[in-house]
Image (spheres, grey):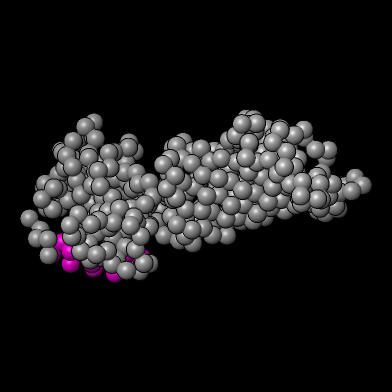
Amino acid sequence: MLSIGKLLAALACASAFEAGLAQTGPSTILEVQLENCVSYVGDVSDPSRFASDPNRTPAPAGLRNFGTTLFLADIVSVNGRPAKGVAVISLRTINLRASPTPGQAIADTVRNSISDYALEILHTDGTPIGSIYASGLSGGAAPPGAPLAAAASSNAVLGGTGAFLGVRGQLGGGPMPVPVRSASVTEDPLNRRIHGGGRFSILVHLIPLERPEIVNTAMGPAIFHGDFSPVTAEKPARPGELLIMSVSSLGPVTPNLDPGQPFPAYQDGNVHVVNSPVEVTVNGKSATVVNKIGWPRLKNIYRVDFVVPDDAGAGMATLGVSAAWIAGTEVRFAVR
């Protein structure tokens, strides 16, 4: 059995060299589903009339070039998992066309507007997970290399906060089963959910600053039985068994901790719980996550306890972990 002292030393060593040990993870694509999508068109110039009409307003006449629109929508899921949040998109019409009609702008491409995106994603209880910010051109074709489901727009992901700190990537529109409702800027957005709106998705192709990775040690992946002895071919895991693994880069915790600080020693039940949704998979199937906490006295190293699914077959199983829908590299461990 590996002593706790040797275990902590091995994990501390892994923490120091985690960047070198990490492998390139899979692509991260977030499909953010939106509902109650309304575009508030800047059809009046008198600020005293903004957001003053409690009624559902008719769609304004076609917006002229250089006009403004503010888009609001509710985030209801990410990659099929229930979520909350808001999408705010600020647009200015430019109507770029190779063969424009009067009032449109001549250009060598087809784009409808210049746009700024802000997506704030929350847990279903309203706890923040993080925000993603993007900017670019809306309408027209998706850029080369975009997700196949992206139907339009060419926006660069400029960064994020919380679980998405430091992300880069690209963003575009996805399927729109219910068209976005267009309203006057005089309509009171207090009643947006009552009056209703469209439904569609935003596809975000992310390159994260760092990914969750199962720590590697000289003995292999840091996966342990309940007594902290390593899971090995000689001492494999069992279906239904609770295992402990050490993972890096799971992001912010609750209560908050200053960036770059080690997790405090465990005292009086004081633990720092990972703020992001964490998912563990065994052979591609979801496994029950029991704990997701910062490992005391270590920096950026976390303890994740999970249950091996009952239907995990004997042999070498694949193990994966994701945080805020960002997945790391899978490893293999023995199951009997």
Q: Which residues are magenta?
A: 6-19
- Quadrant (top left/top right/bottom left/bottom right) for the C terminus: top left
Residue 286, position as x, y percentages in the image? 32, 37
Q: Does residue 38 sit above or below 114 in this rendering?
A: above
Which residue, as the protein is rendered here, is positioned at the far left? 1
Q: In terms of depth relative to the viewer, which is nearer, 204 or 38? A: 38
Residue 230, position as x, y percentages in the image? 15, 52
Residue 38, position as x, y percentages in the image? 67, 38
x 62%, y 52%: residue: 117
When asked about the image quadrant of residue 189, the answer is: top right
106 relative position to 170: left or right: right
Q: In terms of depth relative to the viewer, which is nearer, 263 or 21? A: 263
Residue 151 visible at all? no
Residue 77, position as x, y percentages in the image? 49, 38
- Quadrant (top left/top right/bottom left/bottom right) for the N terminus: bottom left
Give the overall secondary structure of the magenta segment: helix
Residue 195 visible at all? yes
Does the stretch in magenta take in 12?
A: yes
67 relative position to 240: left or right: right
69 relative position to 14: left or right: right
x 10%, y 50%: residue: 227
x 65%, y 31%: residue: 195
Does the stretch in magenta take in 186?
A: no
208 relative position to 50: left or right: left
Q: In terms of depth relative to the viewer, which is nearer, 246 or 115? A: 115
Circle count? 0
When asked about the image quadrant of residue 54, the answer is: top right
